[in-house]
Image (cartoon, rainbow, N blue to C red):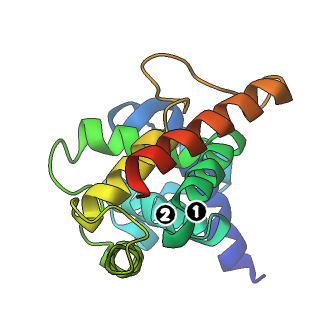
Amino acid sequence: MRDGDASRRRLLDAAAAEFGEHGFAGARVDRIAAASGVNKQQMYSWHGSKDGLFDAVFDDQLERIVDVVPFDALDLPGYAVRLYDEYVREPALIRLTSWNRLERVPRGDLLRGHAHLAQPKLDAIAAAQERGLVVADLLPAEVYSMVIALAGTWSPVSGTFTASSQDDDADHERRRAALRLAVRRTLVP
């Protein structure tokens, strides 16, 4: 990896940690610069502003989760469980998503501008609906939203209980089984 690429990676990682912990409003560019070893002038040269940096971090995290957790419209329960596992393993995206919703996009489609990530999933859900493998009386976007919401039931931003990687394996298995059951009963005919 070239030095510039390594610096950009360090910057995105440090910014993801800072934004995930403090949100957009509470994040400090000085702390991001110190943690990444990238000076603020370079940071602004690459991303233009704190907003631009947040957008780059959010895009990076979305791309990462697409790579780490492959979507399968024919196995929505399994997809929800894999998301749960990733939220426990690496909670940055779910935290960034919540801050983005609270501070920057309070309503509407949070993934607007990310059609290249969402549309293939929606198309796959529609195809599964046509085959009778996913409930057909919901829009594909509604199905996808419900899977994401159910997968986040025990996420770091849960209003009731947050799972962690330190929880007993038996607790994780019980949650996975409950998640599979809920998604299957809700979305699979």
Q: CA distance from mark 1 to mark 2?
A: 5 Å
Q: Position of residue 99 (x, y in %)?
A: 36, 38
Q: Tell me how many marks there are.
A: 2
Which residue lies at the image location 33% right of the left edge and 72% below the top edge?
114
x%, y% of residue 153?
49, 32
Residue beneath the point at 28% across and 42% down: 101
Q: Nearer the viewer, residue 143 or 112?
A: 143
Task: Tell me if 123 is positioned left or right of 78 in this view.
Answer: left
In the rendered structure, the answer to whether residue 114 lies left or right of residue 171 reads left
In the rendered view of the protein, which quadrant contains the C terminus?
A: bottom left
Give the image quarter of residue 107: top left
| Vertical placement of residue 158 versus 132, above or below | above
Task: Give percent across and percent down for residue 162.
Answer: 58, 23
Pointers 1 and 2 in contact (C-beta within 8 Å):
yes
Identify the element where label 1 is drawn: helix
Classify 138 as above or below 184.
Answer: below
Q: Residue furthest right?
A: 169
Q: Which residue is mark 2?
A: 62
**Residue 152 higher or lower than 167, as above or below:** below
Amino acid bearing label 2: Leu
| Quadrant of residue 112 within the rendered picture | bottom left
Residue at label 1?
Answer: 65
Tag 1: amino acid? Ile
